[in-house]
Amino acid sequence: MRDIVLITAPNSSGKTTAYNVLASEALQYGYVEKDKKPTSDFHAIIEAIKIDDRETGGKNHFHEGASHPHSNTYLEDTFDFIVTGNIIIQNMYRIWGEALAALPQEEREIHFAELAGGINLSRYSEIDHSYARVIRIFKDAIIPLKVLERILGDSRK
């Protein structure tokens, strides 16, 4: 069953606007609930940052402008960060994929998902957040195959 609409683009390029337009149309036809939010990689990367804090003391990210590079020991400022290690991106994809896999499958209901991607432009980091990596993530089953089938449909049919 194809029930996940994936909206993907680089950061700050209109994914939320696209979601608002598509969700508004889907709402008119009864395919989504009012005020339902998309499953976003943003929430997944925040969880991956918290994992990095717990497991490595924040080794794979830092906070620009902080009094010292890693100042969120108590997670007082989680949103101001720069990712420096691919392990956070790997965990983000895993968390995001698990959230999509857990979405209920019901007749006449579609879910929206947002995923940022593209070339890394940060001079501080050499992370790979490219679409080529997204393809590898699906091929390596870090995101469950059933999620890809819910986005594209089952190609075996």
Image: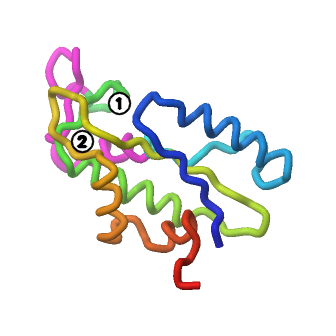
Residue that appears at 45% across and 46% down: 115
User: Residue type at mark 1?
Assistant: Thr
Up the image or down, 119 lies above or below 112; here it is above
- In the picture, the disc for residue 78 is 1
The answer to if 133 sits in the magenta stretch is no
44 left or right of 28 in image: left
Q: Secondary structure at mark 1?
A: loop
Q: Nearer the viewer, residue 103 or 1?
A: 1
75 left or right of 41 in image: left
Residue 45 seen by the camera: yes
- In the picture, the disc for residue 44 is none
Query: In the rendered structure, which segment of residues is drawn in magenta?
Result: 44-71
**Quadrant of residue 68 within the rendered picture:** top left
- Tag 1–tag 2 contact (CB < 8 Å): no
**Quadrant of residue 154 within the rendered picture:** bottom right
Which residue is labeled 2 in the image? 53
